Amino acid sequence: MGRQAAPSTQRVTVVVIALVRIVAKLADGIVTTPRAEADLVVTEHGIADLRGRTLAERARVLVAVSDPAFRAELEQASEQLV
């Protein structure tokens, strides 16, 4: 008889969002997903791992995976907001 693995007790949540646009601040301020629930943000420019990061660190890694045309604007806005 072969050995069998025990079932995983870890909960994994996968959220897939198409057509993501990284912005400094939401216009209406309404968020339906708490920041603690967002672990990874994937764009065509890279992957931002947000787990365990402070707000300032989260802003920095999100700017790093944003469209290069908007990075300077996002960096400036993040310095004012965080």
Image (cartoon, rainbow, N blue to C red):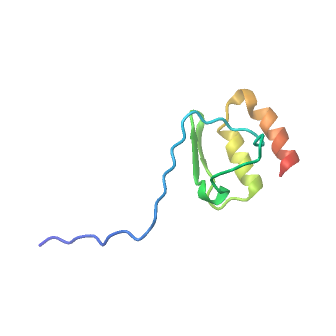
Location of residue 62 (image quadrant): top right
Looking at the image, residue 4 lies above or below residue 74:
below
Toward the right, the furthest residue is 80
Corner quadrant of residue 8: bottom left
Query: What x and y, as percent, mark residue 55?
Result: 75, 56
49 or 81, which is in the foreground?
81
Image position, residue 3 (x, y; %)? 20, 72
Going 57% across and 50% down the picture, which residue do you hit? 40
At a point 71% along the width and 40% down the height, the residue shown is: 63
Task: Give me the residue at 81% from left, 45% from top.
Answer: 78
Give left or right: position of 79 versus 1. Answer: right
> In the rendered image, which quarter contains the N terminus?
bottom left
Tell which residue pokes out farthest to the top in this image.
69
Above-or-below relation of 74 to 1: above
- Residue 42 in percent (x, y) is at 56, 41
In screen coordinates, is 14 left or right of 36?
A: left
Picture mark count = 0
Q: Nearest the camera: 50 or 19?
A: 19
The residue lying at 54 percent from left, 41 percent from top is 17
Residue 45 location (% of width, % of height):
60, 34
